[in-house]
Image: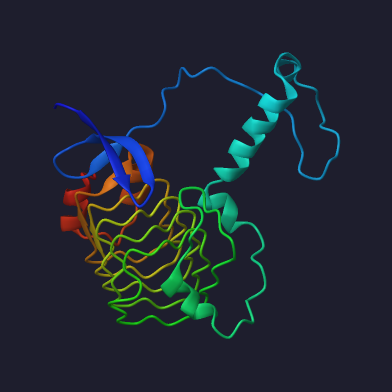
Amino acid sequence: MAALSTPLSHNGFSRSFFSTRRSKIVYPFPHSLPRITCSATRDGAEPRENLSPCKHISTVACGLLAVWALTNTSPVIAANQRLPPLSTEPDRCERAFVGNTIGQANGVYDKPIDLRFCDYTNEKNQLKGKSLAAALMSDAKFDGADLSEVVMSKAYAVGASFKGVDFSNAVLDRVNFGKANLQGALFKNTVLSGSTFDDAQLEDAVFEDTIIGYIDLQKLCVNPTISPEGRAELGCR
């Protein structure tokens, strides 16, 4: 089987992928990468042990590595953190129609996008192509909405409902879809890198030409609600 590496540039998201005829699989970094260890703490406390490699790396370099580690926290770790209180702004649900105008890939934002418990059922016009990076979307309703071409990097969508949602050409990077209802959702040419679907409902979901990492694919294929057609599109074994 031939592998073709092609760059993907969409809504500010750019990286190289290995392509297959069905789902596009992004392979992880090779296991032979050099190991770099640095000691750091969040609250300023002294580390338990002083790791010698950091002595040979400048303070600036170690700081940059620490920032990279924090900004690339997986959605599984984020799920264990305490969520902020529900926003009391009266127009917080309308924030989705504006989206996030600053960061995309790492979920940087100028103001939190709190969409929890908002109802966007059958919204066909105002959400398409928006950037919802780092949005809080748990228990929100998007049933029948058009979310094609959206960027949802590091969004938290636990328990949300996306029945029949069109995610075509969307970037769903490191999104936590735990316990979400995604019945009949359309993932056509959709990036699913680093996203998790623990206990999510995926009956009749369509995975056509999806772009997904090999390890992420293995985790997704464990979900028993995926139809035989969906498993075939993903290449589940």
- Name the residue rendered at 75%, 34% in the picture: 40
Residue nearest the observer in this picture, 92 or 70: 92
Where 65 sits versus 32, above or below? below
Residue 180 in the image: x percent, y percent? 41, 68
Quadrant holding the N terminus: top left
User: Looking at the image, what colour scheme do you see?
Assistant: rainbow
Q: Is residue 175 visible?
A: yes
Residue nearest the observer in this picture, 110 or 199: 110
In this view, the residue farthest toward the front is 101
Quadrant holding the C terminus: top left
Residue 188 in the image: x percent, y percent? 21, 56
- Name the residue rendered at 82%, 30% in the picture: 48
Q: Is residue 38 visible?
A: no
Residue nearest the observer in this picture, 197 or 141: 141
Residue nearest the observer in this picture, 100 or 83: 100
Q: Quadrant of residue 168?
A: bottom left
- Name the residue rendered at 24%, 49% in the picture: 210
Q: On the rendered structure, is 53 left or right of 151?
A: right
Residue 126 in the image: x percent, y percent? 34, 75
